[in-house]
């Protein structure tokens, strides 16, 4: 059985340039990156995408996407399980949210849908509901103001703070002061499918989008910052565009008095600035930058610009005239989203030019790279790259991104791939599944570690959890290879998944007065079956003592009792009591109330603790002076009785010799015979009740006296007669 070793799991990491080991907390940052348990990943409780969406829908939940009419809308749906798709008006959506019946404009139940519907004027919601018992994984594509449903999305390189692994998506977060997107567009030709009237037809955009975070009055504020180049490939022209959107809450307005720059705030919703059109030489090589900083007055500012042909151009410097207690920082976080429901990600993508427009790619050959500024000022490729964006409304069709190197993707024409591409080469992820934290909770967690660092993992074999419960390590699965060891070393030349194989044990305590089954007490596997059988139902001991089995008592939740056998399930700590009755072959040393010795009375087998209030002697029941509780085989008691000789006289007051006498004491009788003096032998008479002796009214002596008197009278009469 397992023993108890109160030792904590330890992880040691040796860096490449040294031999010193450092204990690592699995939730602490490394390379400026924080990681979280896998179940924190936003992909499991939020849709990802724009135009085309990836949905992981838990049973009994739903996701929604908004659209505006009037006009056609194409809908494409593919799901691994049946789902319910509804198109609802804004009123119908509110009715759905509060649990009342909503009348849909369109409804579909199934797994595959490809349809075009006509939206009336107003705001609408496309809702996908999972009413089944299994998680549904679905792709939903929507073409707004276009009749044919295509897979469409912003395509490029995106960091969602989600790294793919064998266990699922690993959420992580980091803050930085700068993002840089490097683009090389060798050739590009697009066709506008939906128009943005203020921009040239058949143009597209190159967007570097990031989330700005700061703390104001103890409340976190998020802003969606866009550094955009609108590109007209027909005339080799481009124009810079800056947008700053509120991502915090509906109560927060973009006050033009507190946000200043080259542009202006429109409708208290968005800050916008558009620069002049400039000529470029194809192929286009350009870098976009977003930098967060503070002014000398402590105000947050965001610098947006681009560099081309060795010339740096500051497009705008957006300053917030507020004083934050934390920040400003550019942030990526795959474990949560903003209060308005937006993902906290960074995107460097190619898409439609603006106004939520959608374009079709005829020709495209480009590479995009996305970097962030690390803790020491170095530029690092983003930890994990995905192929499509979410927080911008413009999309592109027939564009496919593929991985070239960490933080770098190529984009060409072809069927869209929507998903993760690669992870950075400076990090390897150590994924700990069923990792025990503080001897209390088992979680899955992740360590981002430097490539080629060495990891030593030490685990106790047995860990006591309290409450008569312990875990015993049955082994480890390291990338699906079984290792039966409590300590091992890894060189982090790749990501590793370490799965701890714990066996839970519960304590079985058997309380057995007879001490014949206590050896079954101990630790048992969770859900194991234990058979407890009492071999003898009566056990005799040499000191006039015996035990009689009477049954079982247990706190087990699942058990069966048959005669002298208990079968129970070890699904919790269990106590089983073997119930015995102790009996004594008891005897009493009896004394009278005045201390005279009576003798020894054998009572037979009497239960321990049983109270004796009277005894039977020669068929007569005598009460005890005080109740006697049996606690052993040999006992002493005093009767409420005394030895007495009774003198029996008849109605003439003469002794009754040789007479059988009945002495009535309550409802009991004693019998005795008198001697020649009319006296009984010595009798044990109870003194707690009145006793009455019953004998003939006339005894032998009285009869003799009467006869003598009669005879005397007869003789006297005869003499008198003779005289006369």
Image (tube, grey):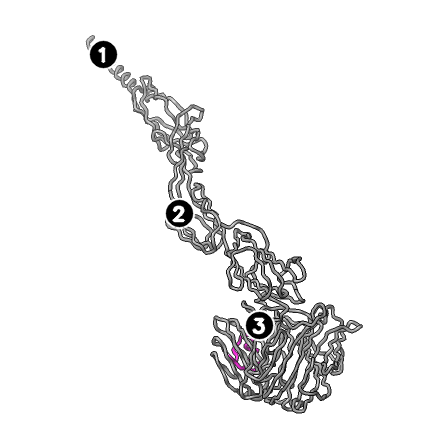
Quick one: label 2 or label 3, which is nearer the N terminus?
A: 3
Q: Which residue is mark 2?
A: 533
Q: Which residue is mark 1?
A: 715
Q: Which mark is residue 43?
A: 3
Q: CA distance from mark 2 to mark 3?
A: 54 Å
| Badge 3 element | helix
Q: CA distance from mark 2 to mark 1?
A: 95 Å
Q: Quadrant of the C terminus?
A: top left
Q: Are marks 1 and 3 in contact (CB under 8 Å)?
A: no
Residue 670: image location, x then y, percent: 34, 28
Q: Nearer the viewer, mark 2 or mark 1?
A: 2
Q: Residues within 10 Å of mark 1 (few under 14, many from 20)?
A: few
The one nearer the camera, 500 or 367, is 367
Residue 454: image location, x then y, percent: 61, 61
Locate residue 225 relative to residue 413 in the image: left or right: right
Residue interval drawn in magenta: 85-102
């Amino acid at each position: 059985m397992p023993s108890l070793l109160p030792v904590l799991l330890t992880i040691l990491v040796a860096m490449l340039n040294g031999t010193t080991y450092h204990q690592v907390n699995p939730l602490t940052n490394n390379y400026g990156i924080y990681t979280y348990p896998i179940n924190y990943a936003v992909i499991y409780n939020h849709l990802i995408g724009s135009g085309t969406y990836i949905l992981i829908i838990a049973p009994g939940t739903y996701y929604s996407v908004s659209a505006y009419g009037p006009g056609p809308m194409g809908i494409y749906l593919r799901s691994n399980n049946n789902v319910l798709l509804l198109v609802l008006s804004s009123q119908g959506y509110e009715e759905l949210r509060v649990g009342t019946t909503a009348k849909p404009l369109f409804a579909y139940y199934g797994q595959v849908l490809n349809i075009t519907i006509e939206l009336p004027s107003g705001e609408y919601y496309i809702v996908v509901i999972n009413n089944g018992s299994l998680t549904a994984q679905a792709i939903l594509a929507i073409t707004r103001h276009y009749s044919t449903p295509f897979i469409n999305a912003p395509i490029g390189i995106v960091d969602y703070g989600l790294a793919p692994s064998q266990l699922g998506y690993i959420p992580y977060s980091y803050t930085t002061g700068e993002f840089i997107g490097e683009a090389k567009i060798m050739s590009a030709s697009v066709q506008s499918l939906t128009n943005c009237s203020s921009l040239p037809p058949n143009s597209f955009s190159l967007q570097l989008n990031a989330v700005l975070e700061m703390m104001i009055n103890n409340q976190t504020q998020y802003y969606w910052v866009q550094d955009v180049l609108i590109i007209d490939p027909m005339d080799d022209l481009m124009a810079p565009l800056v947008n700053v959107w509120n991502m915090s809450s509906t109560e927060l307005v973009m006050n033009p008095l507190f946000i200043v720059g080259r542009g202006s705030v429109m409708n208290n919703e968005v800050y916008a600035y558009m620069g002049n059109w400039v000529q470029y030489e194809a192929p286009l090589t350009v870098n976009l930058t977003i930098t967060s900083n503070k002014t000398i007055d402590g105000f947050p500012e965001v610098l947006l610009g681009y560099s081309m042909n060795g010339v740096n151009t500051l497009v705008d410097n957006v300053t917030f005239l507020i004083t934050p207690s934390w920040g400003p920082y550019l942030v990526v976080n795959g474990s949560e989203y903003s209060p308005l429901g937006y993902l906290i990600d960074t995107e460097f993508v190619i898409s439609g030019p603006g106004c939520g427009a959608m374009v079709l790619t005829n020709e495209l050959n480009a590479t995009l790279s996305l970097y962030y500024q690390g803790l020491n000022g170095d530029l690092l490729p983003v930890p994990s790259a995905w192929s499509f964006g979410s927080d911008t409304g413009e999309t592109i069709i027939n564009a496919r991104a593929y991985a070239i190197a960490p933080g770098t993707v190529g984009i060409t024409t072809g069927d869209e791939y929507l998903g993760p591409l690669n992870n950075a080469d400076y990090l390897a992820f150590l994924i700990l599944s069923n990792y025990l934290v503080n001897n209390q909770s088992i979680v899955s967690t992740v360590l981002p570690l430097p490539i080629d660092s060495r990891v030593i993992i030490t685990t106790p074999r047995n860990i006591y959890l309290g409450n008569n419960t312990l875990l015993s390590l049955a082994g480890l699965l390291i990338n699906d290879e079984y290792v039966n060891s409590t300590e091992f070393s890894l060189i982090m030349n790749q990501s590793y998944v370490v799965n701890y194989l714990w066996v839970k044990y519960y304590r079985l305590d058997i309380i057995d007065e007879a001490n014949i089954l206590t050896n079954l007490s101990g630790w048992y596997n969770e859900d194991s079956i234990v058979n407890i059988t009492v071999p003898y139902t009566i056990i005799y001991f040499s000191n006039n003592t015996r035990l009689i089995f009477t049954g079982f008592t247990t706190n087990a939740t699942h058990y069966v009792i048959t005669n002298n056998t208990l079968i129970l399930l070890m699904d919790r700590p269990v106590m089983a009591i073997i119930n015995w009755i102790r009996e004594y072959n008891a005897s009493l040393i009896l004394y009278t109330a005045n201390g005279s010795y009576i003798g020894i009375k054998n009572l037979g087998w009497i239960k321990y603790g049983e109270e004796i209030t009277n005894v039977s002697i020669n068929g007569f029941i005598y009460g005890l002076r005080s109740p006697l509780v049996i606690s052993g085989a040999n006992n002493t008691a005093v009767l409420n009785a005394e030895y007495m000789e009774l003198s029996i006289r008849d109605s003439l007051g003469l002794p009754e010799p040789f007479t059988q006498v009945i002495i009535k004491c309550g409802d009991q009788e004693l019998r005795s015979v008198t001697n020649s003096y009319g006296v009984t032998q010595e009798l044990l008479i109870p003194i707690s009740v009145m006793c009455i002796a019953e004998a003939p009214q006339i005894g032998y002596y009285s009869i003799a006296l009467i006869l003598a008197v009669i005879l005397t009278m007869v003789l006297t009469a005869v003499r008198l007669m003779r005289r006369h």
